[in-house]
Amino acid sequence: MKLAWKEMTRNKTKFVILGSIIFLVSFLTFMISGLANGLSQDNASLIKDLPDGTFLMSEDAEETVTYSRIDPQIQEKVLSDYPEAVGLSIQMGFLKDNEEKQQSVAFVASTGASYFEEPAQGEVFLDESLAEDQSVGEELLHEQSDMNFTAAGFVKQTTYSHSPVAFISLEDYEKMFRAEEMQLLFVPGEETVQAAGLQSFSKANFLDLIPSYSAEQLSLNMIVWFLVVISGLLFAIFFYMMNVQKIKLYGILKGIGVKTSTLFRMMWMQMMAIALVSLALSALLSQGFTMIAPANLPFSLPVETTLLLSVVFLAVGFVGATLSGIQIKKVEPLQAIQQGEV
Amino acid sequence: MQIKDIRKSFRSGETVEEVLKGVDITLHEGEVTALVGTSGSGKSTLLTIAAGLQSSSDGSVLFEGKDLTLMNQEEIRQIRASAFGFVFQSAHLVPFLTVEEQLSLMLDVAHSALSKKERKAATAQMIEQVGLTHRKNAYPASLSGGEKQRVAIARALVHQPKILFADEPTAALDSKRSHDIMKQIQTLTKQMGIAVLLVTHDEEMLQYADRVVEMRDGVVV
Ligand SMILES: Nc1ncnc2c1ncn2[C@@H]1O[C@H](COP(=O)(O)OP(=O)(O)OP(=O)(O)O)[C@@H](O)[C@H]1O
Ligand SMILES: [Mg+2]
């Protein structure tokens, strides 16, 4: 389509401006989406990194993990029915190092080592974020129970409710929190598992139960979709204004016999060209940022997310441009031809 | 082309104004038919109806045995693209195309059967004939009014139409340039055997016409 291309090269400024705006908006969208994803990773990677599966907690806990107590008999049954399943307990608390420094952590104990670290009694595995202040072999104190732990090692990013996870043994957990029962059962697998007296949650639903998780995600995702809609509007408005300026030209082209569909294709080509270049640029830059982002910045932008967002941008831009192009259809060649200069 | 008993009325609110009251004109190959008459007598209206740019209220426009007034938009568009050429008071060039590209666009639109090479040759020849070879890579913004009008003529003829519709093509030009343009229209259409319907106010231009038809108040007199 020579027409589309010729117009763009002859009116570079106009199209470069639109391109830069789309670039900025899509770059912002990618960055915020990276932050949203990074924050969710930072908030609850303990859960997020698990495979898909069902989380079970007692019905009377009313969707609050800390109140959940799983009946040992039912637990026994679920664990024997599903060999992959594990019992899991999580409690927020503090560990104090020998420099008297308090560190807020999420204590996690489980019945099986398939998904979680399972340290020996008196030992603790810590999230890597604590490696800055603590080192392997260091003694840590849990003041409330007056129990001592030895740091046995560090695990790759594992957090819960924005706190670094401290894996401890089941025995230590029972002593520390005087709790015989587990809070949760996790059964990996696609299908939802049900058990008597227990409420089932999918992974996504369970994540939403974590305080702060859904609030954070909701607002960030809203910004992301808002930006996507804005960019669609930008396309619509921009092409609308361009089309208004070109009504006369369209009339003349129609007058000499150019098809309306050709004019639409011309607009689509331009829209696609601008969008593809701007998106490629912002995708490249945001991926580049992933590589140089500081380690403690919660930022994670998988290539798939970038691609998905890009496709949505293209679709929205297409709709925007097309809606604004409806006026092309209405142009009558007669008026254009009987008027003066373009 | 035979224009038969064309009538056209415009309605504005309650009043219906009959602008054309039954006009008959026949255009012949290689002949320039000039349409003259006072302002508002309906010349432009007649020309645009004959060219398929607006519909008539009644009557018929026969072209190659078919009635334009009975065709749908797409059929009319195809005829406009392949068999008609247009020159108006202003050149109506595409601002972002060079002189050469204006003409090749017209060939594209007309679905010319020419090969790429033949198109280039046809374009070059047409530009040569209107004396703009040295300006073939210029954009409309850098052309003078007369040059633009010459490009418009070249564009209107490059696809070898059957009929050229020209509505006051020289109205915006001075006398010398008007004569240039009209001479070009006359020679080229004679050469190519194209019928011309020319609307003009300028008595001097009538010397280029083979036939003069005068209109007054929507009828030929
Ligand atoms: N779209 C329209 N709606 C209403 N009236 C119209 C329309 N087009 C033309 N007319 C009227 O029809 C009459 C004839 O117009 P037309 O343009 O054909 O005249 P003309 O002979 O070309 O005049 P001129 O020499 O000034 O160009 C005029 O009175 C004009 O006001
Ligand atoms: Mg007129």
Image: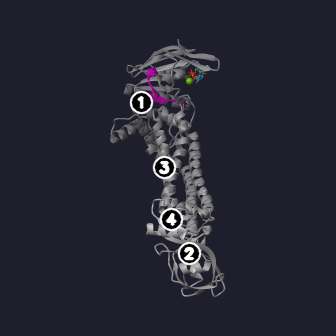
Q: Amino acid at mark 3?
A: Met
Disc 2/disc 4 C-alpha distance (Å): 34 Å
Marks counted in the figure total: 4
Residue beneath disc 1: B78
Q: Are marks 2 and 4 in contact (CB under 8 Å)?
A: no
Task: Tell me which segment is drawn in magenta.
Answer: B68-89
Residue B11 x/y as whole percent: 60, 20
User: Do marks 2 and 1 share a subunit?
Assistant: no
Q: CA distance from mark 1 to mark 4?
A: 50 Å
Q: Amino acid at mark 4?
A: Gln
Query: Chain letter of disc 4?
Result: A
Q: Residue at x 45, y 60 (%)?
A: A190
Q: Residues within 10 Å of mark 4 (few under 14, many from 20)?
A: many
Report the Cα–Cα distance between label 1 and label 3.
29 Å
Q: Is residue A219 above or below residue B5?
A: below
Q: Main secondary structure of the magenta part?
A: helix
Q: Which residue is mark 2?
A: A108
Badge 2 density bin: few <14, some 14–19, many ≥20, Cα 10 Å? many
Amino acid type shown at disc 2: Val
